[in-house]
Image: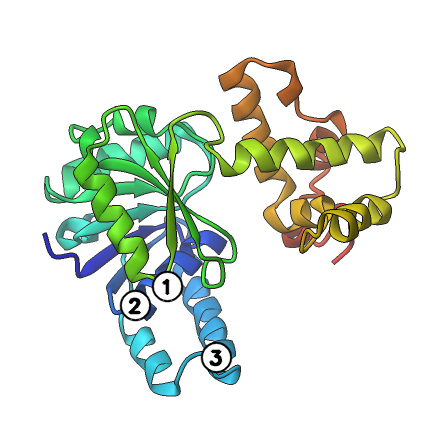
Amino acid sequence: MTIKTIGVIGAGTMGNGIAQVFAQSGFTVKVFDASPGAVDKALKTIEKSLAKFVEKGKLSADDAAATRTRLTAAGALEDFADVDYVVEAVIESLEVKRTIFSALDRITRPDVILTSNTSSISITTIGASTKRPDKVLGMHFMNPVPLMTLVELIRGQATSTESMQTASTLCQTLGKTPLEAADYPGFIANRILMPMINEAIYCVMEGVGTKESIDGVMKLGMNHPMGPLTLADFIGLDVCLAIMEVLHDGLGDPKYRPCPLLRRMVAAGHLGRKAGQGFYTY
């Protein structure tokens, strides 16, 4: 199957980045979001990102212009009837994802691979909502998508080797490095990353150190590009909490218990950079 047209569902931070990298690599991209105005906002974000690439000499003005022409807004999921490959990038909710994949199974051609950018939810469970679980897999991009090279590919219980190979080849076309993970809660990236962030939040709560000291130790002592609390703010504390809950529920080990301070901050709406307030003020 020749893949030319990509459908991206979800026009948030991850969705617009995913749409951008596919469009930059020569694919026609349709972007859909159920929230009014979300796609228009995403296209403006992509425009700014492309302008920065041109300004830094990483992309020519002609290539940026060509990228823009490959991006279109879809008015409904039904507009995905002619796409060749789908990436879903909506909120971390199993029920929302199952509803979307069930609809995509009905709308898209039977040969189309359906992927999810989920950072922790079971691909096997998502795939079970379709009649093509062999063509359902996880394609977990890293944020910010245009800059980060890793794509974590997750094989569900029924995902075929052919589907995984197609996704891997596609990643390489995008200039990304695909690494495969099994379908366990959190996969590889977040099973390791989120407990570290959660432990850093416990350190704040218990007064082990200030937020600046905790971030500084990890930056200067472990050579991390940013501290875990700064990273949590960047990811979104609500997202961190959702992933910790998936780990705790799915693995049943108390070491994955979300820190009470994390729960309290999310309840207060202190979600990090996107809310203007998290561990730091923005």
On the image, the x and y values in percent for residue 238 come to 61, 38
- Split into 4 quadrants, where in the image is the C terminus? bottom right
Residue furthest out toward the bottom: 61
Is 90 placed above or below 184 here? below
> Residue drawn at (51%, 53%), measured in percent from left and top?
143
Residue at numbered disc 2: 25
Question: Tag 2: Cα neighbours inside 10 Å, few (<14), some, or many (≥20)?
Answer: some
Cα distance between the residues tagged 3 and 2: 16 Å
Q: Residue at x 53, y 81 (%)?
A: 56
* Residue 51, numbered label: 3
Q: Is residue 263 left or right of residue 244?
A: right
Quadrant for residue 258, please give it: top right
Circle nearer the viewer, 3 or 1: 1
Amino acid type of the residue tagged 3 in the rendering: Ala
Q: Amino acid at mark 2?
A: Ser
Query: Are discs 3 and 1 less than 8 Å apart at CB?
Result: no
Q: Secondary structure at mark 3?
A: helix
Picture quadrant where residue 205 is located: top right
Foreground of the two, 18 or 182 = 182
Q: CA distance from mark 3 to mark 1?
A: 14 Å
> x, y (%) of residue 125?
33, 24
The number of numbered discs placed on residues in the rendered structure image is 3
Left or right, 225 with respect to 123, comes to right
Label 3 vs label 2, nearer the camera? 2
**Disc 1 target residue:** 21
Q: Earlier in the sequence, mark 3 or mark 1?
A: 1
Q: How is the image coloured?
A: rainbow
